[in-house]
Amino acid sequence: MPSDFDPYDFNRRVIDEFRANHGRVGGPFEGGRLLLLTTTGARTGTPHTTPVGYLPDGGDRVLVIASAGGSPRHPDWYRNLLAHPRVTVESGVFTYEARAVVLAGDERDQAFARAVEADPGWAEYQRKAGRVIPVVALERIAGPGPGHIEAGSPGEAIRLVHDAFRRELALVRQETADGGSSLGAQLRVNCLTLCQGLDNHHAGEDTMMFPFLAERHPEFAPVRERLRREHERIAVLVEELRRAVAAEDRDGARAEVVRLTEELEAHLAYEEEQLVPLLDGAARRSSR
């Protein structure tokens, strides 16, 4: 590492790129799972934002690991959240408040073992650190809706959510293609978290957005019916993926992820083609 390396400047550039591109960054974080974590300074009381890699953990929580690259000292963001457990999380699409919970005992050890199984680099960090590296769950604090979206229009919001699913599908597809014949524990969690996210997203569209549009745009009925049928088809594929994961069948899971990716990509493209102009046109008319 260059002697003039400035970690604060590096973090600032990553943060700016992350926000400008809705979670997409290059460099060492390219293609990985990254979030922005804003904590409150333990001594200063001022907000501090840090890019942090994360692991899916199902439901409304993700895991972050306070490795500090194998440093013998805990990172500043970890000391901050010990003092102030309420944090802000930016996923690239959603911004939401969360509660930081430091895992302990067997729960911490099992989570860290999952991380090591997925990426042996965590074990090297643990060896170098000479301390027990903490694992922290970020539990979303319940509120109305899925969280704030930094989007300029309803149509852009849909595209951003869809892009988040595209990125996660690409990661899971690569993960199922790598390695041996069995599914690791973290990969199983990744697959099941993706399945749950798709279920929740389509349920929200079916029960909230589609009825809203049907009431105001009766001409939307044929599109809505096609999208509803596609939701049912994707639900079948999601259930097949769950079965393969439950059986710890990596080949089966790989095949189901490929099928899901192909059909979901076509569905998302059609939905964007049909809904983005409709939603953005309605938003423009209501703002006049």
Image: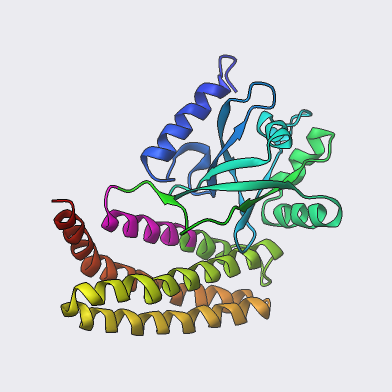
Percent position (x, y) of residue 198? 47, 70
The colour style of the image is rainbow
Q: Is residue 19 magenta?
A: no
From the viewer's perspective, is 241 left or right of 77?
Answer: left
Q: Which of 90 and 239 is in front in this view?
A: 90
Task: Answer above or below: position of 113 versus 95.
Answer: below
Q: Position of residue 213 (x, y in %)?
A: 25, 72
Q: Which residue is more in the foreground, 233 or 4?
A: 233
Residue at the location (58% across, 68% down)? 191
In screen coordinates, is 37 left or right of 108? Answer: left
Using the rendered view, name the quadrant where residue 114 is placed.
Answer: bottom right
Q: Which of 155 and 57 is in front in this view?
A: 155
Question: Front-most of 267 and 157?
Answer: 157
Please provide the residue range marked out in magenta: 152-168
Choose top left, top right, bottom left or bottom right for residue 251: bottom right
Q: Residue at x 68, y 40 (%)?
A: 85
In the picture as drawn, the residue positioned furthest to the top comes out as 4
Image location (x, y in percent) of residue 130:
84, 34
Q: Is residue 115 above or below residue 29?
A: below
- Residue shown at 40% from the left, 45% from the top: 22
